Amino acid sequence: MNCREFADRLNELLDERRNPRADRALAAHAADCQPCDELLAGHELVLATIAHLPVVPASSGFARRVVARAVPEFRPVQKLPASRAWLALSTLLAAAAAMLLAVSLVWYARQGEPVAADPNEIDRDHGSAIAGQGSPRRPVVQGGTRGGSLALGQSNWIVNVPRLPSELRRNYRGTLDNLATSLPQTVQRLDEVERYAPGIKPLRVSFRVLMEALWRAMPGGEDGPATKSRTTRWGLEPHALA
Amino acid sequence: MSGQGHTEPSPEGDLQTLVRSCLAGDQPAMLALVERFRGQVFGLCYRMLGQRQDAEDAAQETFVRVLKNLHRWDPERAFEPWLFAIAGNRCRTALAARKRRPVPEAAVEHLPDTSPDARPAEHLAEEVHLALAGLRDDYRQAFVLFHEHEMSYAEIGASMEIPIGTVKTWVHRARRELIDKLRQRGAIPDQATVQNVLPKDL
């Protein structure tokens, strides 16, 4: 062992809080090397002194002064009572159900209802009355003069509808408006819940993003109101979602 | 043995109960928490700042911050590293403010004399105390936390927000510098200082 190794080994043993004199290799080198022996002795003396340094106590009344300073600015953190926890859960479930309803409406709108066709058009396109067979976009329903039977497409129902019929669009908007009316109450309850459980805030943010996507998904929704006012419309104020 | 299977509550369990009571605004619990750690925190502040009044101010500030931010402590983690992190920051702030003051003050108080016939051990204790005050602040804090408060390198690293390797380096350097200072002052006998023993690149 050389002096460098001695110093490294000494530090290792002290790091492990072991007695360096108990290490045979270290003790053997120290017995043959006076500077290293003095280095070892110096460490032992200093660390023994550190362990017995007098303890200087704080002045009396220290704890009382601390609490007196801390208490005026202290806000107790109350544990969420069980009833509140159930309220939070039910509010979240209601919000999730509303989200699911909105998603379903959009999906249903995208499916497209079969539109009653002009009987004359059906006559002309008899061969293509069945959707997917030549009719470019819309499945058709034969009118009453044709026996009232539905000539529904046997191909898929996912049809590109360039524009929803106005009645369907009105119903869709009406449903979303009802949702917006009930949302402020939900939002208020969510505010209370978030004070106790900040972890659910990301759920609200996700909900807002989804609602905006639904609005845009509605035919003509791209031309809808600006994002900020739409956010307000849904009762989700921007500052509450920061 | 009681024979009734009664188990003593663990210190950690006691602490968590105490913290919960503090969070609920229970003032006796706050007093108990301060009393429990007062010695350790004040001890660190005194080693770092060298003056009783400064140490008391820093310790008081530490506990006020601890109580105000107790809700941020993660019960899954040890309490002491978090506590000493706050104490260390308060000390560093006080040291920085002290360096900015234009009028130099007496840097370090002397340790209280326990008897008029001071024995060599007490002289050495005084010398060690003064030598500690002469160390770089980071080295001193790491050294005191390791050797006086017996914290692990991992806990010190968490408390000072530095890697474990850095903590080790600082503690090793602190040991070396302490011995050098003490030898230069003649506080411990020598025939060679650490610098003469070790290669220059260490």
Image (cartoon, rainbow, N blue to C red):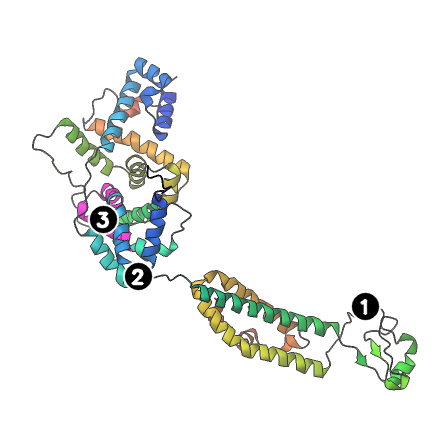
The chain holding disc 3 is B
Q: Are marks 1 and 3 on the same chain?
A: no
Q: Position of residue B59 (x, y in %)?
A: 25, 49
Quadrant location of the N terminus of chain B? Answer: top left
Q: Is residue A79 left or right of residue B129?
A: right
Q: In the rendered structure, which amino acid carries the disc numbered 3?
A: Arg
Assess disc 2: are there few (<14), some (14-19) or many (≥20) residues with their C-alpha within 10 Å of its C-alpha: some
Is residue B97 something that shows in the picture?
no
Q: Mark 3: which secondary structure?
A: helix
Viewer-side residue, A197 vs B18:
B18
Vertical comparison of B182 with A201: above or below = above
Is residue B151 something that shows in the picture?
yes
Query: Of tags 2 and 3, which is closer to the observer?
Result: 2
**Residue identifier under label 2:** A74
Q: Which mark is residue B98?
A: 3
Task: Please name the residue shown 26% across and 51% down the image.
Answer: B32
Assess disc 3: are there few (<14), some (14-19) or many (≥20) residues with their C-alpha within 10 Å of its C-alpha: some
Q: Earlier in the sequence, mark 1 or mark 2?
A: 2
Vertical comparison of A165 with A214: above or below = below
The magenta segment is B41-64
Q: Point out the residue furthest to the top here.
A: A32
The chain holding disc 1 is A
Alpha carbon distance from label 1 to label 2: 64 Å
Alpha carbon distance from label 1 to label 3: 80 Å
